[in-house]
Amino acid sequence: MAATTGSGVKVPQLVEGQKGVGDGTVSWGLEDDEDMTLTRWTGMIIGPPRTIYENRIYSLKIECGPKYPEAPPFVRFVTKINMNGVNSSNGVVDPRAISVLAKWQNSYSIKVVLQELRRLMMSKENMKLPQPPEGQCYSN
Amino acid sequence: MAENGESSGPPRPSRGPAAAQGSAAAPAEPKIIKVTVKTPKEKEEFAVPENSSVQQFKEAISKRFKSQTDQLVLIFAGKILKDQDTLIQHGIHDGLTVHLVIKSQNRPQGQSTQPSNAAGTNATSASTPRSNSTPISTNSNPFGLGSLGGLAGLSSLGLSSTNFSELQSQMQQQLMASPEMMIQIMENPFVQSMLSNPDLMRQLIMANPQMQQLIQRNPEISHLLNNPDIMRQTLEIARNPAMMQEMMRNQDLALSNLESIPGGYNALRRMYTDIQEPMLNAAQEQFGGNPFASVGSSSSSGEGTQPSRTENRDPLPNPWAPPPATQSSATTSTTTSTGSGSGNSSSNATGNTVAAANYVASIFSTPGMQSLLQQITENPQLIQNMLSAPYMRSMMQSLSQNPDLAAQMMLNSPLFTANPQLQEQMRPQLPAFLQQMQNPDTLSAMSNPRAMQALMQIQQGLQTLATEAPGLIPSFTPGVGAPGSTGSGGPTGPTVSSAAPSETTSPTSESGPNQQFIQQMVQALAGANAPQLPNPEVRFQQQLEQLNAMGFLNREANLQALIATGGDINAAIERLLGSQPS
């Protein structure tokens, strides 16, 4: 049952993630290719240019819960990042702080979430936040 | 290369979630698959054997993208592809896309704003600062050498044909780069008096388009600017370097305290990025250097000091450099507050420009500037460029429209204050003189070095006359000779000749335009005894009335206070309250 929940959305997501989207700045895919439940995903955001995130690669874990796509996914940064809306000790993205998560619609997808996070990196309030040294990850 | 089996090369434990993919058995001959590699900028298609390793894939990529393999980071489906993995492991099949990030060795640290701005010419001059680094380094010398080298460097770039506003931004950058000059400038009492006028400061700040944008985004800043107390405090701080340092230290302490509060760090960061950075950058773009950028969590007193920096740098070149170097080149200090008074009593723009011009003029008194002037006058093209720069036009126009201002400006010279007679003389000539400046003939005369020299000769002639036959030139004072000597190359002729009395001491000028010019000068002098400038009492009429209404009945004291504060009622009241025993 879990396997089929939301698969109508997740499978296209999977395909799209594999095909690569748009400008090559975000990427996502199943964390485990064998995962038939299509719940655990990894995402990657390439830091936008002309920001402090430039040239960095941010890895994320995204978990699509049982209610997905009615409910937003849980998103967590694996790579350490200093950004508004992201818990600085464990990388969890606060769903109330990120607009697409706070106002989630079932037409949204993982791609949307990643792209939105990337867009937030370019916002004035984030684009110059000092960042931890590259390559560090959260411990959990 | 074409090996069968799960992995290429010696068997190793394959990492990643697809660990136990035994099913990834490749066929006997490896199929070539087409994989698209996409960077944020480009996209390339690669044909590689299906079972190649990521390492091999990277090698192919590095050739095409002209980078080294260790600079390449491949991402597929949200995972970074490690060198020892295979494409199949990650499920990379024919027709799929892999993302590529090329790590550059020196990463630019997100310095977004310096060259790109809307404020104008800094972009074009961004290339030139590099070549100016050597001249800037000579600034540690007596500044004359520094700027000499600077200008030489600039003109070697063919500056004579470039837009003068580039020169201006060059100068600004050099100024910013040189702390000695900064100190000099800050200590210049005229500057200080200008800084002490909050209204003026506010106008100047508001005039900066970046600031306007910033203010739109952050209304608190406009509150800050509009609060005269804060402005005055700020200006005081700016004036007093020691006090500034104290402030900075206190701010730093306060900030570090804030940091230790949980969540406070973030708030600080936000504050910094919201308010301060844009302000600093706004100033920085104009002035080519953010001195606070290096200060770690630079304090919000950066806000306070920004106005001072902004003011210091606004239009640097004096529109009146060669000819009015006569009047203004020696402008170093204001004994009274007439200079800042001018800012108050006039319309915004004119006050702006005049005070700025005043300030600019004061800069010209420094030896460096004088050598600059020399070079400028030697280069007629430069003069023309300078004079034709748009803001100069507007400055001149506004000055001609408001003779009061021009009078103020002129009167700020210490020479003149030492010579009240001369003051009186200068005043009436101003309107006419200003019109002369507008006259294109005049402008071309100004740009003619020979004309300049001729004027110099006139001045010298007059000087000789003065010593030889003082009776002939009754009000000619030796003090006027001073501008001639200090204003290097500047044709001090006009001033002197106009200082000359109504008697037409015919100038020994060769060229026609010169002669006309001089004659017009003299006529203006002769004919213009009428428009006398209102004295301070009249100027401050309105303020005096207000003070009266408030209950300050001592007219003398009011007037003194108003003069001292340049017409600023609030400051005057404070002065009065400070001096009166209640």
Image: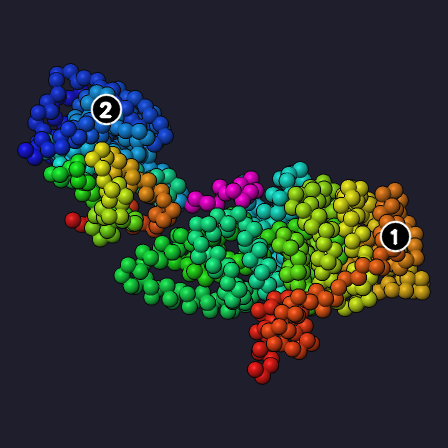
Real-space Cα distance between discs 2 and 1? 87 Å
What kind of secondary structure does the magenta stretch mostly adopt? loop
Give the amino acid at mark 2.
Leu
Q: Answer whether residue B319 is visible to the viewer in this image.
A: no
- The answer for which chain carries disc 2 is B
Image spot of residue B368 (x, y percent)? 66, 55
Image spot of residue B407 (x, y percent)? 74, 59
Q: Residue furthest front?
A: B549
Image spot of residue B347 (x, y percent)? 64, 55
Give the amino acid at mark 1.
Gln
What element does badge 1 sit on?
helix
Mark 1 lies on residue: B523
Q: Is residue B561 magenta?
A: no
Q: Residues within 10 Å of mark 2 (few under 14, many from 20)?
A: many
Indicate which disc residue B177 carries. Answer: none
Q: Residue at x 50, y 51 (%)?
A: B211
- On the picture, is B77 further left or further right than B214? left
Q: Residue furthest left?
A: A1
User: Of label 2 and label 1, which has the lower sequence position?
Assistant: 2
What element does badge 2 sit on?
loop
Nearest to the observer: residue B17 or residue B144: B17
Q: Is residue B112 magenta?
A: yes
Q: Nearer the viewer, mark 2 or mark 1?
A: 1
- On the picture, is B337 further left or further right than B474? left
Q: Residue at x 58, y 70 (%)?
A: B571
- The answer for which chain carries disc 1 is B
Q: Residue at x 57, y 82 (%)?
A: B582
Image spot of residue A135 (x, y percent)? 26, 45
- On the picture, is A75 further left or further right than B572? left
Extent of the magenta region = B111-125
Indicate which disc residue B96 carries. Answer: 2
